Amino acid sequence: MDTSFVKTAEVQHLLDRAAGVDVAGGNQRLKAITRDLIESLMVLIVKHDISEDEFWQATNYLIKGADELGLIMPGIGLEHFLDLYMDAKDAEAGLTGGTPRTIEGPLYVAGAPLVEGEANLTSDPDEDAPTLYMHGTVTGPDGEPVKDAILHVWHADSKGWYSHFDPTREQTPFNNRRRIKLGADGRYSFHSKMPSGYSCPPEGATDVLMKALGRHGNRPAHVHFFIEAPGYRTLTTQINFGDDPFAKDDFAFGTREGLLPVPTRQGDRADIAFDFQLQRAAGKSDEGFSARVRTEAAAA
Ligand code: FE
């Protein structure tokens, strides 16, 4: 059958009723989006002749995999698509330049210790891991040092686990997570135990989907950042180690040109020099974080 079936009067009437378009009250924007979303799914069902069995199999997948949706979204490229879309809208508005944004991922935890000066991110021994030394500057569009910046940094341990999300529960709260308050010179430096890349949880919903698509679920080793500063747009980004085997093949599409520094490795240490550049904010509302719901924990 042809997808024009969805355009029949009976189906269109069903869509109006399902999205509440034919009644007063409710949120108009949500009604419009809901109607389009359901219609898109209907077109999909007809286009691929999706059976009742397949429909309920997919529904069950979503029910059981709900707690991994934060990982499925980057895995299917939608989180990266949001970055591409925001970049394109910025370019249209003449807002270009600065360090590229890239996906936040689902593993940030608010409330990390706020520290100053050369920071040690790692609270746990993680003895066999090399030490990563990372340093650089945070400047604005004209190269001016950004004053009063707070650099949020978080990464996995050498086994690829994040504190607060580690199934072994062996990590100290906020291990490899800090907020670093920068001085007037915009310089930052920290050291930590070198993170490893990781894969999505074995047998979890993301893993099941990746296997069914013939894909892998691996990310290269990386370090996540938010940088916030008065007068500047908050930057969400991450650096991925350029010499990681998955540097060019990240299942979450978080790697981007300009965000792939190669660590200088020597013995049990690795160094990365990396400078960040922020865009100036147009106003207060332009400075903040996205309204994404994030895990929060009390400061240790
Ligand atoms: Fe990560």
Image (cartoon, grey):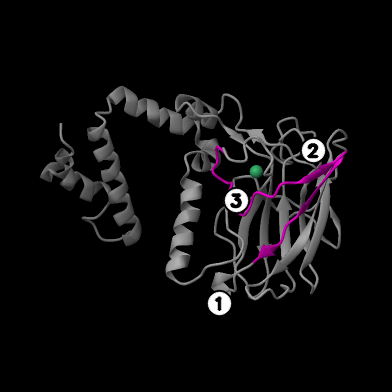
Q: Is residue 164 above or below residue 226?
A: above
In terms of secondary structure, where does tag 1 sit?
Answer: loop
Instruction: Provide the residue designation for mark 3.
Output: 104
Q: Nearer the viewer, residue 14 or 227?
A: 227
The quadrant holding residue 57 is top left
**Mark 2 or mark 1, which has the lower sequence index?**
2
Residue drawn at x 27%, y 25% as measured from the top left: 51
State the image coordinates of residue 177 (x, y, percent, origin top left).
76, 50
State the image coordinates of residue 280 (x, y, percent, origin top left).
60, 74
Q: Is residue 49 above or below residue 250?
A: above
Residue drawn at x 62%, y 36% as measured from the top left: 246
In terms of secondary structure, where does tag 2 sit?
Answer: loop
Q: Which mark is residue 171?
A: 2
Residue extent of the magenta highlight? 250-277
Tell me whether the residue at label 1 lies in contact with that at label 3, contact meaning CB atoms closer than 8 angstroms: no
Q: Residues within 10 Å of mark 2 (few under 14, many from 20)?
A: many
- On the question of residue 27 being in view, the answer is no
Q: Amino acid at mark 2?
A: Gln
Instruction: Provide the residue designation for mark 1.
Output: 283
The residue lying furthest to the left in this view is 9
